[in-house]
Amino acid sequence: MKRSSQVRLASVLALITIFAIPALPLLAQESLLAEPLEQFTVGDIFPKVVDERFLATGKEWQAGATNHATLANDRIAQAKEALSVKKKELSNLKKQLKNARKDKDFVQAGTLEGNIKAAEIVVDVLQRFKAISEAQMKLSEAWRDTGDAIIGFVDADQSFEAFRSLSITRPKLGETDQRLMPDGYRAFDKHTKSLAELGKAFAQLGDEMENLSSVRMKALDELDKGGHVVKK
């Protein structure tokens, strides 16, 4: 993973830790750690990570991403349609210019050259608009995938909840074995893998945000070069 992705992932997980994990009172933590090993449970070592608020976040992100994708898709379609029209107009103008030069109609040729330059600017702006919309679509897809991953992780965390009360010590002779068994291992494996998938989803979301930022800045710089905005 790239360093920038590692930094983003660390930041995201830190935020999850701060805002999503139900905090235990300090005295309760100290008391827990002072208990004999026999009293430790699986949940003491692997406590609950998230709650219903995180699940709500996942659902909100899914809905937001769907709306974002719809808007981006509409803009892409509009850009493609406009580009098709403008490119045909540009091609027509170039044919007319070729004929005007052939006929030595320099006045008409000069007018057409100006029209061609204006049409090329429009095509370039539309291409920038399309590139931004495509980057926004990728971002919305990553946003939706992150919402899916959040919901998947909450589901895995809830599934593991049933095993957190189990013991981590071997039973004494004649006692019932209360340790984590294969079904619990499978639940924990699902929990761990879903956490990894969540991290990957956040990292991908960060990458798409960086990409959109870059595409937008490039478009603004090009507008500045063309005199359409004033940078300084």
Image (cartoon, helix red, strand yellow):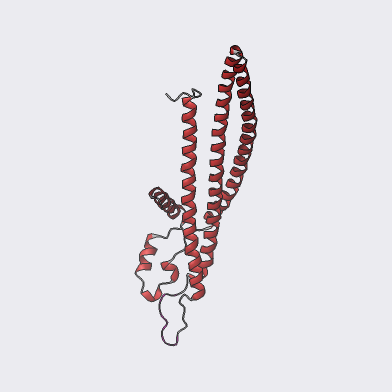
Residue 85: x, y in percent? 65, 30
- What range of the chain is rendered magenta? 167-174
Residue 205: x, y in percent? 49, 48
Q: Residue furthest front?
A: 102
Residue 108: x, y in percent? 61, 14
The residue depicted at 45 percent of the width and 84 percent of the height is 175
Residue 90: x, y in percent? 61, 26
Q: Nearer the viewer, residue 39 or 225?
A: 225
Q: Nearer the viewer, residue 112 or 6?
A: 112
Give left or right: position of 171 versus 88: left
The residue depicted at 49 percent of the width and 35 percent of the height is 216
Q: Is residue 51 above or below residue 186?
A: above
The residue depicted at 36 percent of the width and 67 percent of the height is 31
Q: Nearer the viewer, residue 48 or 30?
A: 48
| Snapshot quadrant of residue 114 | top right
Count of residue discs = 0
Magenta: main secondary structure: loop
Q: Nearer the viewer, residue 128 or 48?
A: 128
Q: Residue furthest bottom?
A: 174
Asked if the stretch drawn in magenta spans residue 186, the answer is: no
The residue depicted at 34 percent of the width and 69 percent of the height is 34
Please identify the quadrant where the C terminus is shown: top left
